[in-house]
């Protein structure tokens, strides 16, 4: 399937942001300039910017244009349905520690299809509520096949274009299926400390695994949410 022009423009802008040509708070090229550069209508450029806005990469400023966002957003683990964007359930977050390679918990290793003792790349983020308190603690695990091909995953800072777009650009692999499993248990001492809750506290744990077009695991995320915050709503037809 050919890539549409506005998708090409959005991808090009993501790459320019990722390469540091535009940083947080920088003004991106105007719709007129991009329309002339790509030989397209202003409406096509608007569609490109709308994609980037929905992904949380840019924000619109009245009378100025589009700026690279200064407050990156991410989503809690799970609920990554087709057609959803980073702004769908997205929230500010804080990166914790430095990404490292270690042996994941057994249920994560099983979801990723790893062998006994096989390491994966770990990235941890703390999702925040509007008042700055913790919403959920999310640990993302990437198999070596993904981490080796996408070296910026080892960087401490956020990936402005989003890990999904970055991994697709570097590897050609992208998610086509997701599996979410939610369980309940007590928070560990470390989880309670990051979430700002006292022990013992019940937490809902969502294990989200994304699979690519050949059903190979791309990432497994474990999201830990305090019970007093967790809420899940499903809407579905009934006969």
Image: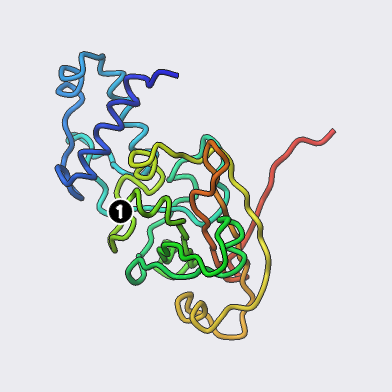
Counting labels gives 1
Image height of 147 relative to 53, above or below: below
Quadrant containing the C terminus in the rendered view: top right
Which of 154/139 is in front? 154
**What residue is rendered at 46% in x and 69% in y?**
134
The x, y position of residue 79, in whole percent, is 57, 48
Which of 234/144 is in front? 144
> Quarter-wise, where is residue 200 in the image?
bottom right
- Name the residue that disc number 1 marks: 151
**What residue is rendered at 36% in x and 47% in y?**
162
The x, y position of residue 182, in whole percent, is 66, 60
Quadrant containing the N terminus in the rendered view: top left
**What residue is rendered at 37% in x and 53% in y?**
73
The x, y position of residue 109, in whole percent, is 57, 63
Q: Is residue 11 left or right of residue 183?
A: left
> Quarter-wise, where is residue 201 in the image?
bottom right
Image height of 134 relative to 14, above or below: below
Number of residues whose C-alpha sits closer than 10 Å to that of mark 1, classed few (under 14), some (14–19) or many (20 or more): few
> Quarter-wise, where is residue 112 in the image?
bottom right
Judging from the image, the colouring scheme is: rainbow
Residue at disc 1, secondary structure: helix
**What residue is rendered at 43% in x and 45% in y?**
87
Q: Is residue 69 left or right of residue 54?
A: left
The x, y position of residue 99, in whole percent, is 35, 66
């Amino acid at each position: 399937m050919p890539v549409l022009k506005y998708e090409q423009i959005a991808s090009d802008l993501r790459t320019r942001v990722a390469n540091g040509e535009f940083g947080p708070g920088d003004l991106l090229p105007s719709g007129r300039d991009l329309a002339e550069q790509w030989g397209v209508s202003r409406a096509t450029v608007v569609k490109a910017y709308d994609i980037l806005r929905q992904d949380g990469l840019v924000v619109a400023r009245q009378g100025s244009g589009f700026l690279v966002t200064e407050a990156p957003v991410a989503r809690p683990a799970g609920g990554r349905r087709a057609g959803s964007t980073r702004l769908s359930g997205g929230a500010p977050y804080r990166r914790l520690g430095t990404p490292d390679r270690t042996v994941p918990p057994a249920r994560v290793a099983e979801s990723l299809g790893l062998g006994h003792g096989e390491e994966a790349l770990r990235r941890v983020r703390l999702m925040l509520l509007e008042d700055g308190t913790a919403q959920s603690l999310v640990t993302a695990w990437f198999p070596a096949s993904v981490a080796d091909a996408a070296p910026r995953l080892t960087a401490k800072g956020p990936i402005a274009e989003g890990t999904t777009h970055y991994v697709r650009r570097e590897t050609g692999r992208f998610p086509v299926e997701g599996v979410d499993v939610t369980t309940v248990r007590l928070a560990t001492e470390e989880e309670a400390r990051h979430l700002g809750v006292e022990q013992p506290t019940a937490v809902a744990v969502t294990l989200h695994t994304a699979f690519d077009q050949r059903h190979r695991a791309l990432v497994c995320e474990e999201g830990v949410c305090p019970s007093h915050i967790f809420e899940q709503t499903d809407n579905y037809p009934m006969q």
